[in-house]
Amino acid sequence: MDIDVKKSAPVGVFDSGVGGLTVAREIMRHLPNENIVYFGDTARVPYGSKSKDNIIRYSRQIIHFLKTKGVKAIVIACNTASALALDVVREESDIPIIGVVEPGARAALETTKTRKIGVIGTEGTIRSAMYEKIIQGIDPEATVIGKACPLFVPLVEEGFAKHRVTQEIIDYYLASFLETDIDSLILGCTHYPLLRSRIREYVGEKITLVNPAYETAMDLKQLLKARGIENMDTRQEHAAYSFYVSDAADKFKQFANSILPYDIETTKQINIEEY
Amino acid sequence: MDIDVKKSAPVGVFDSGVGGLTVAREIMRHLPNENIVYFGDTARVPYGSKSKDNIIRYSRQIIHFLKTKGVKAIVIACNTASALALDVVREESDIPIIGVVEPGARAALETTKTRKIGVIGTEGTIRSAMYEKIIQGIDPEATVIGKACPLFVPLVEEGFAKHRVTQEIIDYYLASFLETDIDSLILGCTHYPLLRSRIREYVGEKITLVNPAYETAMDLKQLLKARGIENMDTRQEHAAYSFYVSDAADKFKQFANSILPYDIETTKQINIEEY
């Protein structure tokens, strides 16, 4: 491939739905020249309660789709898919693939002083214990306490982020953390930054919330630089962003416009089962 | 097909996940000779927030799968798929297919005195206004008030049916019904019977809760009789029931055993995208 073509090639970003837009947003902010092709698997969302086998199969189909768009690298902007499928799909791929779990784990280790770290995420992410494996691979003496919070995703998706019941459900899931001496809590699901201020209020100042999205954008930057495939073209006013989903493009667009710093114009729907 | 073979052929029952087991349970109770093949689309659950196009596509794949099991009739035990896909798939099929919306609508009309009926369901079911269309097709002067309750399914699936927050969410969704003079409320989603006692407590004695599951079993009975394909074989101790899912068979089995009157032994996982 021509090296210039490769540099201007887009980065593929995918998630089970809209949550990964919180990662895309960080890439847009910190790598403003990079073109992005985003895919949200809204036909099969959520991933958090589904099995490893299916998450691997879904990830393979999506990577196949993104490759048809000529992407030069892929970011799995979904904690569940990063935890359950990254190892397998990275092995199979001829382009670099990164997830959100490794960057999140490193960010938590840089934050903690007590070396006691909490992780909240979907059932699949917590059951995989992937944050624990990576954190303890770097610092074997660190302690990791995980807690699955399966209702957080539907609460965000149904617009309950600011509703009173959400505070009660936060209390239900996070009360046990208050009795520990964790000083760092990883928001291990891309929907959770949308509950950030509520969670912050609940856990207080002693615990720092870690959002893997920023760290992931930094990892991507370093990766593109190391391989000499950064997009240096600053002529365009802003980079090109395309959005694809497997279901209900209009609903996605509406949600996306509440998360992203600018309004997206078109979202295309594809049949991901064909890939 | 040999007429005897046809009579002993199973009935296919499908849903997006476990909710349809509340319909299967009524069939087991009231048509005890009928063999059943149940399919739960746990890889793509929930259906309630997804588009008509995809729900039709999913329903076609499942009907295709059930036909490979030699079913003599199919029950769509999912309100969303009944509301969005039944008309289309019934037209295409050479075996009879019934849904849960028509039986539920008729049951509500038999119950109401004020001719004012409430319906709760998923976003897809309520947006389709299918209950309203069917009810007003029978009684043009009946009034139907629909309300989507998208958090009820995750609350049930995550085991919050008895938790305090569920009461608050019931209040959030159903408060507006208390100011109307509906006297009949259709539980228009197969998960909702699992919240029945909480909803009953909230709406009080003036409003009768209508669960389409029983009526659906009665419709199936009538249909099989009319076509002369009832299973008359009473020699077996109980009929044969098989369970298939598209994801995480173990999790399904656990939930199923809390709903069904007997413990199911095996659940098989298949790749529904291949059908």
Image (cartoon, coloured by chain):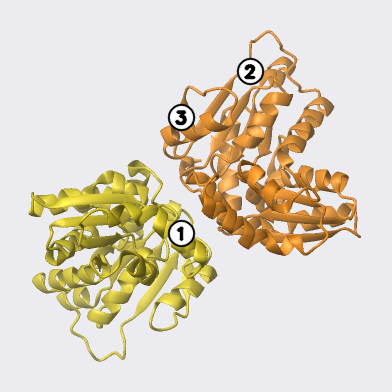
Chain colours: A yellow, B orange
Going from the N terminus, do you reach mark 2 or mark 3 first?
2
Q: Is residue A8 left or right of residue B94?
A: left
Mark 3 belongs to which subunit? Answer: B
Query: Which residue occupies the extreme front position in the image?
Result: A179
Tell me the amino acid under the disc marked 2. Ala
Residue highlighted by disc 1: A168
Residue A246 in sight in this render: no
Q: Secondary structure at mark 3?
A: strand
Residue A258 % position (x, y): 45, 77
Tell me the amino acid under the disc marked 1. Glu
Residue B240 % position (x, y): 60, 19
The answer for how far apart the CA atoms under marks 1 and 3 are is 37 Å
Q: Nearer the viewer, residue B182 or A156?
A: B182
Asked if labels 2 and 3 share a chain, the reply is yes
Q: Nearer the viewer, residue B274 or B244?
A: B244
Picture quadrant of residue B249: top left
Tell me the amino acid under the disc marked 3. Lys
Q: Nearer the viewer, residue A220 or A121?
A: A121
Asked if labels 1 and 2 share a chain, the reply is no
Residue A238 % position (x, y): 31, 87
Residue highlighted by disc 2: B239
Residue at (12%, 66%) from the top-left corner?
Answer: A110
Q: Is residue A240 above or below residue B176?
A: below
Mark 1 belongs to which subunit? Answer: A
Question: Mark on residue B257?
Answer: none
Question: Mark on residue B268?
Answer: 3
